[in-house]
Amino acid sequence: MKRTRTKRRGGLARAAEQLVWLATGLALSGCRAEDRYWENLLAEAIDTLLDEGDEDTFNDALDHLYGVDLRAYDELADFIESRAETAAAAAPEHDILLIAAPVLAWSRYQIPACSIPQAVLANLRVHMQAHVLADGVKLALADFLFSPDQLPQGYCATSQFATELGHAALAGADLRIATDGMPETAHFLSDTRYLLGAIAVPRGKALFRWQERDGNRDQSMTQWRTQGGACLAPLLPGCALEVVLPEAYFAASRQADKASRPYAVRASVAFLGTALDTPAMRLRAVIAPFYDQELEEFRIGFTTQGSERVVHGVVWPLLGAEDENSDCAVQIETVLRECGVTDIVNLDHRFPLEYCDDCGAPMYPSPEGEVVHAEMPEDQGEHVPRHLH
């Protein structure tokens, strides 16, 4: 998940000032003994705010630090995430962790966000415990495949969800998700779905398979891709999918954000190949940077060779510490060439972050250096998502 803050005006409330002071102290600490002092105080302060549901204090402190001390900002953000996803107060004698198993999918039809049948949930549990989790870990899974719009919103909601799932894990049960009133899912060509769960172990014991002496991440990923992917595929009919290694909630979400960028490019090339009967070698890709106050993202406009009409587009957002000095354009070009696209145009003009006034879709760069609406040919556009991600 991208951490982007906008500094707010005005003074800080006392609780936010305390978080800033503690995070700054931790950032300046010179030894592990001092780290532990600051960490204990920070954990106590954050847990209190999570229990009170005080999301604004977290945001105020983070906004302030983002503008004055990035090292302290990172310390505070990491600590808030850690306390939110570990449900620290749920069971003091256990380590509880909210986990996510992201799935990247693309389809020219609606990508489902749906309840998971008990038989599928049982199979997912077996393979996750066999290939991803350490021996003896208790697991609870939520019986719903979430879209990004349906995930817990904010640190406090995440902490509440982690606590609820953590109690289910300790009880050896899965969690039934009430779908009434759940937010609608946006329609994109490629998107991410999330299988969520919580794990519980006696405090200090291994959580994941790769923490054990005979395990490693690559082996877990290979086995989960094969076994977990096969269980998830029936939930996503008509979709091509790629799984991401399950791990701690925020880490998995950020890894999904990172992996979704090249996946969206590959999905777009494959989609255009089938929708327009156009092989990759006959596509042209136009890459350009898009700015608000600073560089926010790159956008890729696709045309067919011999035409200036942009038929499709992809957004490549900047993540984490990426900025104008990052090699995002090189990464995009590398992915395009791996897909077989060789006609690539790189524009260095600073384009404004523009969207369509009618439908809200991003505007994409054309070979002439303009920003335009991506429009499929009329006879090919019937089942194409209106918003092209």
Image (spheres, rainbow, N blue to C red):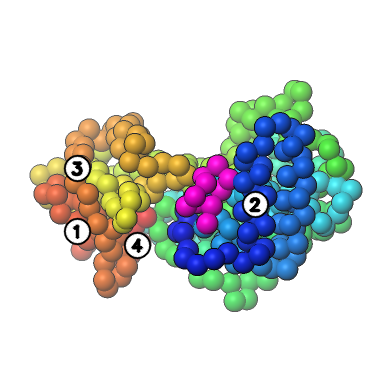
Mark 2 surroundings within 10 Å by alpha-carbon count, few (fewer than 14), some (14 through 19), many (20 or more)? some
Looking at the image, tell me whether mark 4 or mark 1 is earlier in sequence order. 1
Task: Give the farthest residue toward the top.
Answer: 214
Which amino acid is tagged 1?
A: Val
Q: Position of residue 279 (x, y in %)?
A: 25, 39
Location of mark 1 (residue): 372
Which amino acid is tagged 3?
A: Leu
Location of mark 2 (residue): 21
Instruction: Give SS at disc 3.
Output: loop
Number of marks drawn: 4
Instruction: Give SS at disc 2.
Output: helix
Res 282 seen here: no
Looking at the image, tell me whether mark 2 or mark 1 is earlier in sequence order. 2
Q: Residue at x 81, y 46 (%)?
A: 95
Q: Residue at x 34, y 57 (%)?
A: 388
Marks 4/1: CA–CA distance: 14 Å
User: Within the magenta stretch, is there residue 67?
Assistant: yes
Instruction: Give SS at disc 1.
Output: strand
Q: Is residue 119 left or right of residue 260?
A: right
Marks 2/3: CA–CA distance: 44 Å
Could you say which disc has been placed on residue 347 in the image? 3
Q: Which residues are magenta?
A: 64-73
Task: Give the farthest residue toward the right.
Answer: 93
Q: Is residue 298 left or right of residue 202?
A: left
Location of mark 4 (residue): 387
